[in-house]
Image (cartoon, coloured by chain):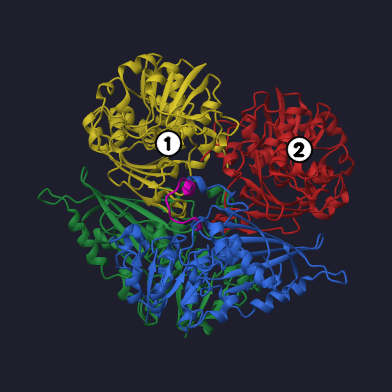
Chain colours: A green, B blue, C red, D yellow
Amino acid sequence: MIKAGIIGATGYAGGELVRILLGHKDVEIKWYGSKSYIDKKYAQVYQNMFELVDEKCMDDNMEQLAKEVDVIFTATPQGYLASLLTEDILRQVKVIDLSADYRIKDVAIYEEWYKIEHKSPQFIEEAVYGLCELNRDKVTEQTRLIANPGCYTTCSILTAYPLVKEGLIDVDTLIIDAKSGTSGAGRGAKVPNLYCEVNENMKAYGVASHRHTPEIEEQLGYAAGRNITVTFTPHLAPMNRGILATEYASLVKRADGTYPTKEEIRSVYEKYYKKEKFIRVLEDGVCPETKWVEGSNYVDVNFVVDERNHRIIMMGALDNVVKGAAGQAVQNMNLMFGLPETEGLELVPMFP
Amino acid sequence: MIKAGIIGATGYAGGELVRILLGHKDVEIKWYGSKSYIDKKYAQVYQNMFELVDEKCMDDNMEQLAKEVDVIFTATPQGYLASLLTEDILRQVKVIDLSADYRIKDVAIYEEWYKIEHKSPQFIEEAVYGLCELNRDKVTEQTRLIANPGCYTTCSILTAYPLVKEGLIDVDTLIIDAKSGTSGAGRGAKVPNLYCEVNENMKAYGVASHRHTPEIEEQLGYAAGRNITVTFTPHLAPMNRGILATEYASLVKRADGTYPTKEEIRSVYEKYYKKEKFIRVLEDGVCPETKWVEGSNYVDVNFVVDERNHRIIMMGALDNVVKGAAGQAVQNMNLMFGLPETEGLELVPMFP
Amino acid sequence: MIKAGIIGATGYAGGELVRILLGHKDVEIKWYGSKSYIDKKYAQVYQNMFELVDEKCMDDNMEQLAKEVDVIFTATPQGYLASLLTEDILRQVKVIDLSADYRIKDVAIYEEWYKIEHKSPQFIEEAVYGLCELNRDKVTEQTRLIANPGCYTTCSILTAYPLVKEGLIDVDTLIIDAKSGTSGAGRGAKVPNLYCEVNENMKAYGVASHRHTPEIEEQLGYAAGRNITVTFTPHLAPMNRGILATEYASLVKRADGTYPTKEEIRSVYEKYYKKEKFIRVLEDGVCPETKWVEGSNYVDVNFVVDERNHRIIMMGALDNVVKGAAGQAVQNMNLMFGLPETEGLELVPMFP
Amino acid sequence: MIKAGIIGATGYAGGELVRILLGHKDVEIKWYGSKSYIDKKYAQVYQNMFELVDEKCMDDNMEQLAKEVDVIFTATPQGYLASLLTEDILRQVKVIDLSADYRIKDVAIYEEWYKIEHKSPQFIEEAVYGLCELNRDKVTEQTRLIANPGCYTTCSILTAYPLVKEGLIDVDTLIIDAKSGTSGAGRGAKVPNLYCEVNENMKAYGVASHRHTPEIEEQLGYAAGRNITVTFTPHLAPMNRGILATEYASLVKRADGTYPTKEEIRSVYEKYYKKEKFIRVLEDGVCPETKWVEGSNYVDVNFVVDERNHRIIMMGALDNVVKGAAGQAVQNMNLMFGLPETEGLELVPMFP
C-alpha cells in the first residue's frame, strides 16, 4: 500500500483527494493535514466522510510527514510549499503539488503574476508539469516533484493542444472564454462567494490578469514551438463543479489558399486523443456540457468550424476538482508508482 | 458475471442503475430498454456514458429478456410491470421492480391511491418489500420478485423505524414533512419541471394525497403492530438530488409519568442501526444534510428532543436516486445473488 | 417628503429597504448607515444601485441621525439598538426596528433565547409589534417605536392565525416546518453560507431552539388567549429568497363529535384576510409557492384537510426580505405617517 | 389610458410584459392572448398574478384585437405574426413584435437563418428596429410597426456599438461569447430545459449557427458602414434570468503605430451612453454581473484592455426578459405614444 499524506485536506481539492483515494485500492491516507482544523475530526469538517474517515486533522509538519508516507499531496495556497520544500524532503518522499509553485519554469514570470517571491526556485527545473496526456513520458517512477496543472489550464490547454501542435490554428488569435463552478474559488469565507452573491449570477473576473494565463501560454507555447500570448477570461458560474472553456482561433490559411477542413481537424484531434482514456472527443455536432463529466476524470472536447470567417470554436469541459485538481493528481501518482494510470479513477460521471 | 437487463433505462433511476452497475465487478448490463429511444445509442441519450456504454436502446420485450439475463430491473411507470409479468417470466429470471406495483399488500389500497387496476395481483403476496435493513432475512437467493421501496418511503420509514418498533413515540402523532430534489419528478417533459419553474422555488404538492403515504403506513404499521395513519407532505426543492425528511411525533409517556430520554432514544437508534453499513446515526447535535449523502447509498439520521412539549424531531437524508432507487435495487440484487450486500455500493458521497 | 435613515443599510434587509424606498414617492433616504463600509460609496457595495444612489456609507450615529430624519430603520444585529436607544431619540424620530430587540414583551424570555442582556427594557412595553394585519389599530401616527416582526414569524403566524383565533385547531398540536432562502442568513462571510455549501443541499437547523420560536408563541398565544408552546423547525433551502411554512395541527373536535369542514375553515380565512391587500388566500387545491411572491409584499396562504386523521395542513409563502423584513417595515412606516398602507408596496411578484 | 393587447401572454416574455404594464400608470391590458390556455384564468397560469389580473386567456384574433386596443404586443413564435399581419391591422393599431419577423431587412437572410418562408415581406421596410438607444429618432408617434430586438442581440450590440461606430476596434475580429439564463429558452416543455438537465450545467449551443447572428451583423454593420461577419456563441447558464456578453476584438492600430488608450475608449463609451438612462458604463475595474440588473431595464457595460496583445475585452449584462424583451418593448411603446421613455420602467434591480 502506498502511504499518502495530504496537506490542505480540508479545502475542496483536498476533500476530493480524500474521496478519490478512499476508492483507490493501493493507497491509504495516513495524514489529514489542515492548519485551520487541527485536532478536529476530519469527518466533522466534511460530514460526508462520517464513518468513512476516523482520523483527526493534523498540523502541517512536512519533515515528519516525509518520514511517514510515500507521497505528499499539497493542496495549499500559492507560495506555501515553495517556502517549505527541501532537498531532504524530496529525498524521502514524492511530492505532488496542486498549487502553482512549480508550474512555471521562468521564476520571474511566476513572481510577476503571483506577486510573491519564490522561496525555492532551485526545484523548478526538476519539477514535472503533470499534464499526463502531454507529458506522460516525464512522469515516471524516478519523478520526485510534480507540478499538478491548474483547473482552467488543464481545460484550456487540452481543448486546443492538437491544433496548436499541428499548426492548424493561428495561435496569435487564440481567445479562451472559460466558465467555472464556484468550488474553484475555494472554501474561504468571503462575501463574493456567499450563496446569495453567486446564485442567479454570471460575471467575468480577473480579466486580462488571471494567474492561469502564463501557465497556458507556457504549455501551448511548447506546442507551438515559440512564445505566445493568449487572451484568457475566466467567469464565475452558479454551479458547484465544472469548467467549460470556449476557445476561438482563426484557421491557418495554407499556401494554396485553402483552410483545414472539418475532417482534417477531427482527424488531428483523434490522432492525439483517440488513445487517451480520459479525453473524449465527442461526436460531430455534440457540444460538451460540464454535467456530463461531473465527478469524473474526463475531459470532453469538440469543435465547430465557422465557414463564413474561417474561424474555429473549440470547446472543452471537465470537473475542476477532479481532472482539474485531485483526479489529475492521482493520475500522476499512479504513474509515479508504476500503477495503471487509471487506477482509482474509473469514476462514472454522475447525472443528474 | 450476472447478466442484467434494465427496462426504463433512460429515466433518471434507470440512468443511475447504469452508473452503479458499471462499477459493479460482478454484473454486466445486457439490455438497455427504453421505449422512447429505441435504436438510439444509449450514450446519445445520456452523454455522460459516452465511451462507457456502446449499446443501443432496445424495446421492452420482457419475454425475450427473461431468456437472456439473470435479473431484470424495471424502472417503469406504475402499472406497467403488473401488466406484463407472468409466472413464466419469474421462473426464468429475477425481477427487481422500482415501480410501486408490488409494494402494497392490499390490492384495494393500491388501486385506490394509484387510480389504476392491478393486472397481476397474484404476485403481490410473493413479492418481497426490499427495504434490506428491515427485511434482510426475506431477500434471499430464493427470492424471485422484489418490490423496491419508494424514495420518500425509504427515507421516511428508516428515519422513524426504531422508535416505532420500540414504542417510544406515539405513532398516531407522526407527521412527515419531506423535501425532495427534482430528479424525483422524473425526466418527462412537463412545464412544472422546467428549470425556470423549479429554480428559486419551494412548494408542497400532493398534500394529504401522495401515493407514498399508504406504503409508509403499511411498513411502519408492521413495526407498530397495528394499522396506522400518518400525515405525509412532500415538497419540491430546487436541487437535483436528495430527500430530507423531517418527522415529528410525541414521545410516549410512561406509567411513571416520565418520557424517554435523549440517551434512551439514541441507544435505540444504535441498537437497530449500529451494524448497518448504509445507515449513519450522526453525532449528537448534527443535523443530516442531503449534500452529505449525494451520490452514495447512505441514509443519515438523527433527532432532537423538544423537552418543552415532549415531542421529538427526527431527521433523515438520502440520495433519492441511489438509496431511494437504484442503489437500493442493487443492494437487493446483491442479496438475491449471494454477494456481499455492499458490493458495488461503496460510493463515497461527493462534496461539494 | 419623509426623510429616512437606515442603520445597517448594507445587509440584505437594508439593501431591500433601499430598493423599496427608491420607489416610494413620499420618502427620501438621507442616511445610508453601515459600520463595515464607512465612506465607501453605497453603490460600490451594492452595484445594482449604480447611478441610482450616489451617497456614501455613514457611521452609525443615532443621536445625529435623530435630528436629521423623520424615521430610522434599524436592520442591525440583536441587542444593538437596545444598547443605543434613548428617550431623547424617541422624542425626535420614529424608529422601526428590524431586529428582535423589542418584539418580545417578557424580557426574561428574550434574554433566555437570545443569550444577551437587554440594555433598554424600559421601551419594550411601548414598542408595537408591527404585524399590521393583526395590530393595525396600534400602528398609528402616535407610534414611536415599531418592533418589526421576524421573517419566519410573519409567515408562521399569518398562516395559522385565523384558525387559532377562532379556535378551529388544537394549538397544542401545532407544528411549523419552515423552509427559507439563504438571504435570511445574512451577508456575513461564513463557511456554512458559501455557495458550495448551500447549493444542492437541504438541512434543518436550530431545531427546537430557534429564536423565532418564542415570538411565534407570544403572538399566537394572544390569539389563543393563553400561553402556548409550538414546535418550530427552520430549514435552509438552496434559493436566494422566500419562506415556505408548512404547518400541521389537529382540528378541534366539537361537542357533537364533528370537525370543522373545509368550507368552514375557508370562510374563517376569508373573514380575516379577504380585505387584506397583502394576504392572498389561494383557490382550493392550489399550494403556495415562494416563487409566486418573490419581490413582493404578499403572503400566499392555503390549507388542505386530511379527512383520514382530522388534521389540517396549512401553508404560507412570502418573500423573507420583503414581507418578512423591509416591505413590512415600509408598511408600518406608511401607517405611522398617515399614508396609504400600500404606498410604495404595489410590487408585482417577479416570475420566473 | 393606452389600451394594450398581448398575443403570447403566457410565455415568459409575455408574463414579463404583464408585470411591467401593471406598474405603468398610462396603460391598461385589455387582452391576454394565449392559444394554449384559452378560457383559463390568466392568474391560474401565472399564480404570481393572483388577485392582480382577473381576466381569462383569449384566443389570438388580431383583427378583432386591432379594433379594441391601441397597441398589440406579439410575443409569439417566429413566423406567426408575419403570417397574420395586414395593412388593415396596421391602419388601426400599433404593433410591437417581440419575435424576429421584421428585424432583418434582407428577407433572404431571414429565410436562410430561420428556415421559414416570410409571409409578409412587404412590411419589413416599414418596420423600425426598436433598439431605442440607437434608433430613437425613428421610433415616433407615426411608427406603426416595431421589430423589438432579440435578447442576445440587444446585449451584444450595445456592448460593442460605440467602439464599432467610432472605428476603434477591428470589427472583423469581433467575437461574442454570450451566457444566458434559461428563461430565454421559453416555457415550452422540452427535456433539455428540465430543471435537472440545466441545473449544475454549462454548455454552448447553436455554435456558429444561432439565429441572432445575422441580426447582430446587420446592426453592427450599419455602425461600421459595411457588411461584417461576427462569431457569436450562445451558452446556457443555470439561472433564470440574465445575459452576460463577453466580447473580444483587436484594437485598431493607427497610422502612427499607436493604439487607442483606455481613456480614449472610456470617453467614447461615455460619449454615446452618458446620457442614456438605461445604459450604465461601470467604473473602471468593475465587471458587469447579471444579478445587478435583474428585474430592471438596465444594461451594464464595461471593458478591459489587454495591453499585451492590443485586444479589448468588452462586457455587457442585461436581464433578458426586461431590456432583452418586455422592458424594451415598453420603452418603444412609450416613444410611440409620446410618453417619457422611462415611464413604467424605473425598476430598481433586485439583489439578491
Q: Residue B27 appears at what percent x and percent y?
A: 39, 78
Q: Position of residue B252 (x, y in %)?
A: 79, 67
Circle 2 residues within 10 Å: few <14, some 14–19, many ≥20: many
Q: Which residues are magenta?
A: B184-195
Q: Chain of mark 2?
A: C
**Residue C99 seen from this side:** yes
Q: Residue at x 40, y 24 (%)?
A: D132
Left or right: B245 in relation to A295? right
According to the image, label 2 marks what residue? C131
Quadrant where the N terminus of chain B is found in the figure: bottom left
Q: Is residue D340 above or below residue A1?
A: above
Q: Quadrant of residue A189?
A: bottom right
**Amino acid marked by disc 1:** Ser
Name the foreground residue: B299 vs D107: B299
Q: Eyeballing the image, is D69 above or below B261?
A: above
Q: Secondary structure at mark 2?
A: loop
Image quadrant assignment for residue C66: top right
- Answer with left or right where residue A223 lies relative to residue D37: left
Residue situated in front as seen by the camera: C97 or D27: D27
Pick the front one: B335 or B144: B144
Residues flagged by tags 2 and 1 on a common chain: no
Question: Residue B296: x and y, percent?
Answer: 52, 69
Task: Please name the residue that numbered disc 1 is placed on.
Answer: D36
- Residue located farthest toward the right when viewing the structure as drawn: C122
Q: Position of B141 compared to C342: left or right?
A: left
> Could you tell me which chain the residue with mark 1 belongs to?
D
Give the alpha-carbon distance from disc 2 to disc 1, as whole Å: 41 Å
Number of the front mark, 2 or 1? 1
Q: Secondary structure at mark 1?
A: helix
Location of residue C44 in the rendering, given as x and y in whole percent from the top left corner: 57, 39
Residue B259 lies within the magenta run: no
